Amino acid sequence: MSKSCSRGDQKTQEYIRKQSVKAVVDQKQKVVDVAATFGVAVNTVYRWVKQSKDSGKASLKNQNRGCPKGVSSRNGKYRTLSSSFLFLNREA
């Protein structure tokens, strides 16, 4: 079951980012109005506009998040550090 505050899938989120920036930069709409139209925070629209100006519109595309496939906190770096910590505690 999805949350009521969900903004949709990744393509929808990317579309909202691009349309918001286009409305502010190209169409000279007020950030407050754009934020209200798309249901996002005003600071979020400001961040998207700055990100677009600094890194280009390609920076508004979806990016992979989280651990790469096949890696989790159980078999990655975290496990190694926690195992070392437990080993050191046993010696004390």
Image (spheres, rainbow, N blue to C red):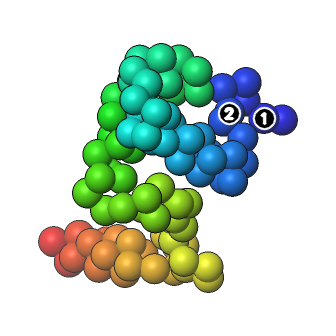
Note whether 85 is above or below 42 in the view shown: below
Looking at the image, which residue is at 43% across and 59% down?
A: 57
Amino acid under disc 1 = Ser
Dot 1 falls on a residue whose secondary structure is loop
Dot 2 falls on a residue whose secondary structure is loop
Give how far across and how far down residue 4 sits, in percent.
73, 24
Residue with the mark numbered 2 = 6
Identity of the residue furthest to the right in this view = 1
Q: Is 75 left or right of 48, judged from the image as shown?
A: right
Depth check: 10 or 36 in front?
36
Give how far across and how far down residue 80 sits, in percent.
37, 81
Task: Report whether residue 6 is seen.
Answer: yes
Residue with the mark numbered 1 = 2
Evaluate if marks 2 and 1 touch, with contact meaning CB atoms under 8 Å apart.
yes
Q: Residues within 10 Å of mark 2 (few under 14, many from 20)?
A: few
Looking at the image, which residue is at 29% across and 53% down?
A: 53
Looking at the image, which residue is at 38% across and 39% down?
A: 25
Depth check: 33 or 11 in front?
33
Q: Distance between the residues labelled 2 and 1?
A: 7 Å
Amino acid under disc 2 = Ser
**Of tags 2 and 1, which is closer to the observer?**
2
